[in-house]
């Protein structure tokens, strides 16, 4: 019986491997490449043709309305009033809460909207507009920016990588479902900041530090959540300059390089913020909107430590200032192992892994985390997919395991997630616990995210130690 089971498993493994190899051959050609992206475009169009979050749901109408409302506000109000509460700008009705580059993006789209049909952005009168023509315009704006910026950036990274199966890798990267569902379905522009981040990473890897710094500052100024990647970027730029500091002849060059990067970062920030400075806008009010600490440590059922702890200890009993200090301390402490490894061994592999660890640390432990922030560790995870396929595929809910134990663990985990989703759709929650399924889903994801966080910290520290050991062995 055992021999028969082993034989069945062997045949199944052989068959799966053959199918996988055949698929790789099909998509390794130029025709396969074109088919891949045509299929991607078809999926995006199909999802865009559907409904969106908040449709026919007054009084707020969802994120689709939020994006439209920002166009309305930026087109009609003076720049200094964009982030300020007033009779024409009720901040409780989707007040602008992203940095200047998002505001300028809304302004540009708003001006185009006004040229096509002024009713789309009519001040106050356009709230909740749901015409098909406006929906088409909004959907096309997402598709256009995604195909101009994000998809070329992720494909460029793939083709600059050392991965042998580049089209296979491209498929994994561009078909990541959460981003497609979030931007093409739910409706947002997360792909713009992620695309700028990817361009920055490409530049850093190619040693184009000035361009990379500019792109990264632009990413942060489009979505402040890009700060999740800021610590690894800062440490990588610093550590790649450190070796020459110990050489007296190159000390001046290193100082000049760091000064140049500092000037570029500050100058880019000033350029983006200068319209607000020149208009006399209240910068403190803008920062207050961008970093909403007043909202509490977490909102809704987010799969992080605070949502998990809140099941046992109700965090609303504690002052927000104390929780902010605690979350800051946790974020710093959980960054230390990977950042120290990056500082000691500033290579591309550790840099990419640390980007993932850092963004996951912020998602798990930082203050006021939104569920869409999982996109930041997810896109960083795509960068290290070739090196850690099973772990990253598991993280991205894509299975690529070959060994039985890995197959069992990964597929069992995914099966539980499917069961939770089905249960939430077909089973009515108890009246006493109306949000039980959302909470179970958040806790389930939290356990996985925390496990990935611990595992990749172990990986990066182990890699750093192994490289140092090999270097010492060679020197001896």
Image (spheres, helix red, strand yellow):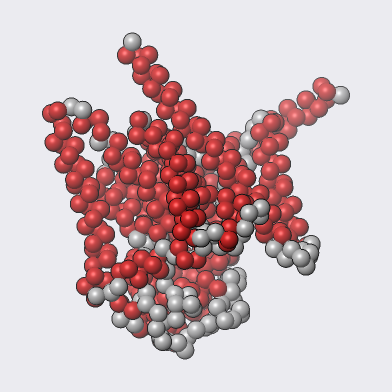
- Residue depicted at 30% across the width and 77% down the height: 80
Q: Nearer the viewer, residue 340 or 327?
A: 327
Looking at the rendering, which quadrant does residue 339 occupy?
top left
Looking at the rendering, which quadrant does residue 209 occupy?
top left
Is any atom of residue 230 visible in this view? Answer: yes
x and y percentages locating residue 431 in the rendered image: 78, 67
Q: Is residue 275 left or right of residue 424?
A: left
Q: Nearer the viewer, residue 201 or 277?
A: 277
Q: Residue furthest right?
A: 1
Relative to 423, residue 243 above or below: above
Is any atom of residue 33 visible in this view? Answer: no
Q: Nearer the viewer, residue 114 or 378?
A: 378
Q: Residue furthest top?
A: 476
Q: Is the N terminus in the top left, top right, bottom left or bottom right quadrant?
A: top right
Q: Is residue 259 left or right of residue 138?
A: left
Q: Is residue 306 left or right of residue 379?
A: right
Question: How many numbered marks appear?
Answer: 0
- Residue depicted at 46% across the width and 70% down the height: 140
Q: Is residue 425 left or right of residue 356?
A: right
- Residue depicted at 36% across the width and 19% down the height: 471
- Residue depicted at 28% across the width and 74% down the height: 281
Q: Is the C terminus in the top left, top right, bottom left or bottom right quadrant?
A: top left
Q: Nearer the viewer, residue 235 or 282?
A: 282
x and y percentages locating residue 389 in the rendered image: 55, 37
x and y percentages locating residue 415 in the rendered image: 72, 46
x and y percentages locating residue 92 in the rendered image: 48, 77
Relative to 362, residue 236 above or below: above
């Amino acid at each position: 019986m055992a021999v028969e089971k082993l034989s069945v498993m062997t045949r199944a493994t052989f068959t799966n491997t053959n199918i996988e190899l055949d698929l790789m051959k099909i998509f390794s050609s130029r025709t396969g490449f074109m088919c891949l992206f045509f299929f991607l475009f078809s999926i995006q169009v199909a999802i865009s043709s559907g409904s969106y979050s908040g449709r026919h749901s007054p009084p707020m109408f969802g994120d689709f309305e939020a994006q439209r409302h920002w166009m309305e506000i930026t087109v009609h109000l003076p720049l200094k009033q964009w982030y300020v509460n007033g009779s024409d700008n009720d901040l409780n009705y989707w007040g602008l809460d992203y940095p200047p580059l998002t505001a300028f993006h809304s302004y540009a789209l708003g001006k185009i909207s006004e040229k096509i049909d002024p009713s789309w952005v009519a001040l106050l009168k356009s709230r909740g507009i749901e015409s098909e023509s406006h929906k088409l315009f909004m959907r096309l704006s997402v598709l256009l920016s995604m195909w101009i910026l994000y998809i070329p950036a992720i494909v460029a990274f793939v083709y600059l990588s050392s991965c042998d199966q580049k089209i296979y890798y491209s498929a994994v990267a561009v078909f990541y479902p959460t981003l497609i569902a979030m931007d093409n379905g739910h409706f947002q522009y997360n792909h713009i900041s992620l695309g700028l981040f990817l361009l920055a990473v490409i530049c850093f890897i190619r040693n184009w530090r000035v361009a990379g710094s500019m792109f990264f500052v632009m990413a942060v100024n489009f979505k402040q959540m890009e700060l999740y990647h800021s610590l690894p970027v800062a440490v990588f730029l610093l550590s790649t300059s450190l070796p020459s500091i110990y050489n007296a002849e190159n000390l001046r060059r290193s100082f000049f390089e760091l000064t140049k990067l500092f000037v570029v970062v500050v100058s880019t920030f000033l350029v983006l913020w200068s319209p607000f400075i020149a208009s006399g806008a209240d910068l403190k009010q803008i920062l207050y909107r961008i970093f909403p600490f007043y909202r509490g440590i977490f909102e809704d059922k987010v799969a992080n430590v605070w949502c998990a702890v809140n099941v046992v200890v109700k965090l609303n009993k504690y002052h927000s200032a104390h929780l902010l200090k605690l979350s800051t301390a946790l974020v710093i402490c959980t960054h230390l192992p990977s950042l120290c490894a990056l500082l000691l061994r500033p290579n591309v592999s550790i840099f990419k892994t640390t980007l993932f660890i850092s963004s996951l640390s912020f998602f798990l432990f930082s203050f006021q985390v939104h569920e869409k922030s999982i996109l930041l560790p997810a896109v960083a995870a795509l960068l290290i997919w070739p090196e850690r396929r099973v772990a990253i595929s598991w993280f991205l809910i894509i299975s690529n395991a070959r060994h039985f134990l890995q197959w069992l663990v990964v597929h069992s985990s995914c099966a539980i997630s499917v069961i939770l989703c089905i249960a939430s759709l077909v089973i009515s929650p108890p009246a006493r616990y109306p949000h039980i399924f959302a909470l179970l889903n958040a806790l389930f994801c939290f356990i996985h995210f925390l496990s990935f966080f611990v595992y990749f910290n172990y990986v990066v520290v182990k890699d750093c130690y192994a490289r140092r050991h090999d270097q010492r062995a060679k020197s001896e």
